[in-house]
Image (spheres, rainbow, N blue to C red):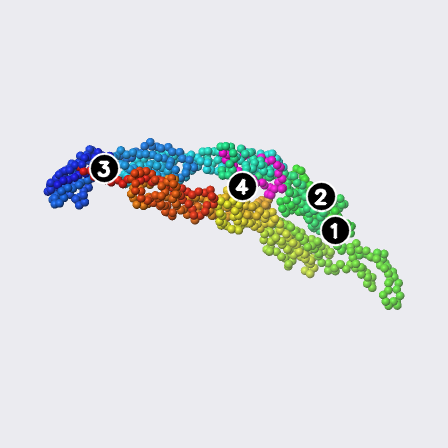
Amino acid sequence: MQIIPALKESELCDYDAINPAITDSYEQEPIGTIIYSIPVEGEVGTEIELSLSVEDGHDDKFDLDIQNITWAVVYDMEAENTLTVIVGIADVNEFPPVLEDSPYKVNISEFTQLGTTVLIFGATDEDCGIVHLYYEINKGPGYNLFDIPSVGTPEVILVEEVDYEENTWFNITLLARDSDDDDALTGTGEMHVSVIDGDDMRPIFGDITYNTMVTENDANVLLLPEFPVNAYDQDFGIDEDLNYSFADPERTDDAIYETEYFRINDMTGEVTLIKELDREALPGGTITEVLRAAQVNSMGYHVYTYRDGYATLVVTVLDVNDNIPNMSKPLYYGEVAEHSLQDTIVCEVSATDIDEGENAIFNFVLQSDFVNHNMFYIGDPISITPNTAVAFIRVNDSTSLDAEYIAKPINFTVYAIETQTSELFRSEPSTVSITVSDINDNIPLFVGEPYIASVNGDITEETYLITVYMSDLSKVYVNITDIIHATNYTNNASEIPVFLNDPYNAITSEGSDAGASIYRAMAVDVDGDDLTFTFGNGFVVTNDGIFRISPNTGEIFLNRKLDRENVEKHSLMLLVHDGNPDSNDTTVLSVVVTDINDNDPVVTALEYNVMVPEEEAGFVVTYVRATDVDYGINADCTFTVVDRLVNDFAVHNITGKVTTRRGLDREHKETYEVYIVATDHGRSPRSGETYVTVTLTDVNDNPPEFELNTYRATVVEYMPEIFILSVKANDMDAMDNAAVRYAIIPDSHTDYNLFTVDAMTGNVYFSSYESTENVGENLVVMIEAYNEVQYTSDDILNGTTTVNVTILVIQCHLTIMI
């Protein structure tokens, strides 16, 4: 029987094949009989390994003893006289792969496109028969930024963006394995990556808000001399020169170097006041400007469209005493009953000084050439706003108030004069005209008495007898009866007490402390009885016990502080009696409570959760409103956006309309918490805030982008249509705008007709390629990724990638006959 041993090159090992040979063997040979000794070089088991395969049905008949083929059974030949035995030869794997020229130094810009090849390296293996090496990146810091797309190709590509501001370098470990088995030997190498800074960061100011002060009426003053405006480029590896300007209110690209009041140095950022400021003409006494820092390109031209940063300059204008007080009227009128008690209010005057602080503090002066100039005095001013005060002219000497001797109105001069300034500015004087009204305080007297008249006894009808005369310094009427006498019809026999100059009005601040005196009621009793003051049964007030009255003097005090926001006006019924309950008089005291700034504004929004389309500047987000239970300037509010979002959102300071200041990019940031602050105009301002959640809705402003610029695959000739790989593109947009579709680009310079792609999945299929002439050549096809939704701009192009396919010949084992 003939045994035909054959050798094959296992794993394409570079082995000198032995010439085919035929050996003979007899049947019925004992087990273990050597049939053929394989002539190989090298120690079997340590340097080389041998394997044995036999025709189907005969694999149990032979054994391989080291390098000898032996009988495994006692063979009895019946039909076959020739058997083929195939011996495989393989090298023993004892050497790991070696990465050539490691470590590798790689420089990558921040702007390097994803899919770009950053390193092509090589590896060798001393073992015979190792044809394919398998490459991968070892896990470690930064490994996820890179990838080896084909495990059989030593090519590293960039798959995620690098950021110089986060990391300037990476050490990546590369691995090469000599098989994909668990017992494969592995070689390592190092890829040292240096990140090159790209111009991808905006300039930033040292402070979000610069606060400074300047005195009004100054000019050509350098602001912030000790802590000047300063910005820097966040791309520290580039550090571009910056150009400073003021931001245009419409957020256009035009740089503004001079505003109505300020000039900015475009190179240094120094801000200079160029025009005198009038604090009184400025709302809140401040000016706000938006500062801008923009990069300057290598040509020296200014770039304002993208690389810029913003900050806010708030200039507080300090007051100069450049305004005099002003009386509210040129002429004031007052009236008081004669003999009114001391401190009785005659009239009220007021003045305003539009300066600030101590420059707005003043007093009132009352002057008269009248002989009894001490008849009245003017009280201390009472502030009702930071710039306005009132004062009451009161009775000083009640004994001199005699209407019978003061026939005409008394005229005084009143003016306001500053008290805390060196200038002591005074207002133009106003006139106060006071009329002393008469009360019935004189007895009528007959003039020329006694009177004598003769009458006949027989007079039966009304007859003129005589004319009598009487005089009353007060205004009286005379009644003549049959017994001639005179009487004043206004006199009351009961002589009840009477309130003077009622009804009463008082003004007091809600900031007045408990125990403060707010008014003094006046009453007289002709009989001279002792008078007692109380609250009457008609005492009307929101909370009992707020006021108390002195029974002896009629002075009214506060028991506790008032709250104007609870009750703005109190009406008190006052009663005075002389000990006889039926001998009393009543009047009403109205107490007006003035405001202090003791409440924060409450800010509410028309909508708190708003959907806003991205990339739309000037879009109305919502409206905010502020309610402040205080009054006047204490309730007037101005709206602002918190500093950190001042570049993205704006709010009208009066109307509360919130808008987008620029087009926002959803793919950069999808949700914003926009804080709106309302600040009132009180002397000690108070504020409140609210926030609105803004969610950007997507527009189709981004094309799909493939994960790789180039895909590689290998296929075998003569195969039917087969799946070769999947391409993958991602779209930063959302929902329907992110739905990616795939298509072959019919480019005549490519082999597009040999490929198909699934529009939904990106699976690429290869059609049969039945030519062996071009084995090993590369076929190229281009694939585009697109959206079915229209892009927002015609400038947006579909994403594209290239697929390179290598055609391989079918590899068959060749049996060599020995």
Which of the image's four quarters has the N terminus? top left
Mark nearer the N terminus (2 vs 3): 3
Mark nearer the N terminus (3 vs 1): 3
Identify the element where label 3 is drawn: strand
Horizontal and vertical percent position of residue 706: 39, 42
Question: Depth-wise, is mark 2 or mark 3 nearer the camera?
Answer: 3
Q: How many neighbours does mark 1 have within 10 angstroms: few (below 14), some (14-19), or many (20 or more)?
A: many
Q: Is residue 599 magenta?
A: no
Q: Is residue 90 above or below residue 463?
A: above
Mark nearer the N terminus (2 vs 1): 2
Question: Depth-wise, is mark 3 or mark 4 nearer the camera?
Answer: 3
Residue, disc 3:
9
Inspect the image, locate mark 1, and give the three-letter code of the amino acid beneath it: Val
Question: Depth-wise, is mark 4 or mark 1 nearer the camera?
Answer: 4
Query: How far is disc 2 from disc 3 in space, using C-alphas?
Result: 123 Å
The residue at the point 18 percent across, 38 percent down is 817
Inspect the image, locate mark 4, and give the three-letter code of the amino acid beneath it: Arg
Residue, disc 1:
436
The residue at the point 68 percent across, 49 percent down is 348
Question: Depth-wise, is mark 2 or mark 1 nearer the camera?
Answer: 2
Q: Which mark is residue 429?
A: 2
Query: How far is disc 2 from disc 1 in space, using C-alphas?
Result: 22 Å
Residue, disc 4:
251
Mark nearer the N terminus (2 vs 4): 4
Which of the image's four quarters has the C terminus? top left
Query: How far is disc 2 from disc 4 in space, using C-alphas?
Result: 51 Å
Q: How many neighbours does mark 2 have within 10 angstroms: few (below 14), some (14-19), or many (20 or more)?
A: some
Query: How far is disc 3 from disc 4 in space, using C-alphas?
Result: 75 Å
